[in-house]
């Protein structure tokens, strides 16, 4: 209880700019379990229900409507979104990548064994490995790549470098993030322009199903981009 109180006080007294920097720091997310010892404990408490929330159900509904089978998530965190897909999309296999390897597949680890057979996780990204895994499914690309509140932690250069290398493997890209030219508490971007540079067209855009609590001044959207892949 005392540790929790001290942590809350530290967060409150940190300048807003410092808190924003921490939120956008890859170092923080890579070592979040160490920096925030309550993270794993709290995750155990809400894991049973947090996989089944409107945002994640929305992703699975889209996958089912379009009969998508091979799904990749960049920055999958504890894999709650992928767990939702495995539960709701029996035709789908999922692949996840995250820099925080200590909790990357946490939700799937406690799921039925049949789910683990339909999932694979990466500690590093490698073109040869991804192409090889797709070939095992007689696929040349992922039907959908999900970027759920993760591109905000990358620089413009890192985003361009990623899509320059890997966009040929993504037929559809789903981005739930902060959109627009104005800057709120989080880094906002014109994702339509970014994705057009990599050959994608904006297919769907609407309000994110993330909670808007405490989000004044931030424009949270969900968009889906498509491209023709030979």
Image (cartoon, grey):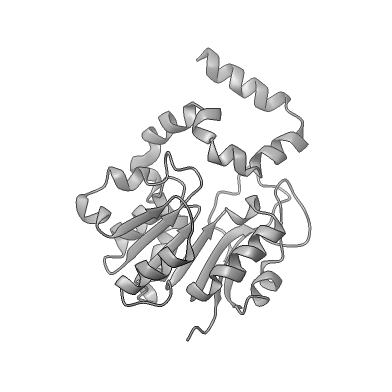
Q: Give the mark count.
A: 0
Where is residue 94 drawn, in percent x and y?
Answer: 36, 61
Direction from residue 215 to residue 3 in the image, left or right: left
Where is residue 50 drawn, in percent x and y?
Answer: 40, 45
Where is residue 143 drawn, in percent x and y?
Answer: 42, 73
Residue 170 visible in rendering: no
Quarter of image, res 190: bottom right
Above or below residue 130? Residue 121 is above
Residue at position x 47%, y 56% in the image: 55
Residue 72 visible in rendering: yes
Residue at position x 21%, y 55% in the image: 114
Residue at position x 58%, y 18% in the image: 5
Direction from residue 184 to residue 208 in the image, left or right: left
Q: Which of the pair 118/133 is nearer the observer? A: 133
Q: Which of the pair 161/52 is nearer the observer? A: 161
Where is residue 216 drawn, in percent x and y?
Answer: 70, 47
Above or below residue 186? Residue 167 is below
In the picture as drawn, the residue positioned furthest to the left comes out as 113
Quarter of image, res 44: top left
């Amino acid at each position: 209880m005392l540790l929790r109180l001290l942590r809350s006080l530290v967060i409150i007294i940190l300048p807003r700019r410092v808190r924003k920097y921490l939120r956008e720091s890859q170092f923080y997310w890579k070592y979040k379990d160490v920096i925030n010892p309550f993270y794993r404990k709290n995750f155990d408490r809400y894991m049973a229900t947090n996989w089944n929330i409107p945002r994640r159900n929305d992703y699975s509904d889209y996958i089912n409507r379009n009969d998508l089978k091979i799904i990749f998530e960049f920055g999958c965190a504890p894999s709650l979104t992928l767990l939702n897909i495995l539960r709701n999309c029996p035709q789908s296999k999922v692949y996840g990548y995250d820099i925080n390897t200590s909790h990357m597949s946490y939700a799937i680890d406690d799921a039925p064994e049949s789910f683990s057979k339909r999932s694979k996780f990466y500690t590093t990204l490698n073109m040869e490995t991804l192409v090889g895994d797709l070939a095992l499914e007689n696929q040349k690309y992922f039907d959908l790549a999900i970027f759920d509140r993760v591109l905000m932690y990358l620089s413009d250069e890192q985003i361009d470098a990623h899509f320059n290398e890997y966009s040929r493997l993504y037929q559809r890209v789903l981005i739930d993030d902060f959109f627009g030219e104005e800057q709120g508490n989080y880094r906002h971007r014109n994702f339509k322009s970014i994705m057009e540079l990599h050959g994608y067209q904006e297919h769907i855009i609407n309000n994110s199903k993330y909670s808007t609590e405490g989000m004044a001044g931030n424009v949270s959207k969900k968009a889906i981009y498509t491209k023709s892949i030979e």
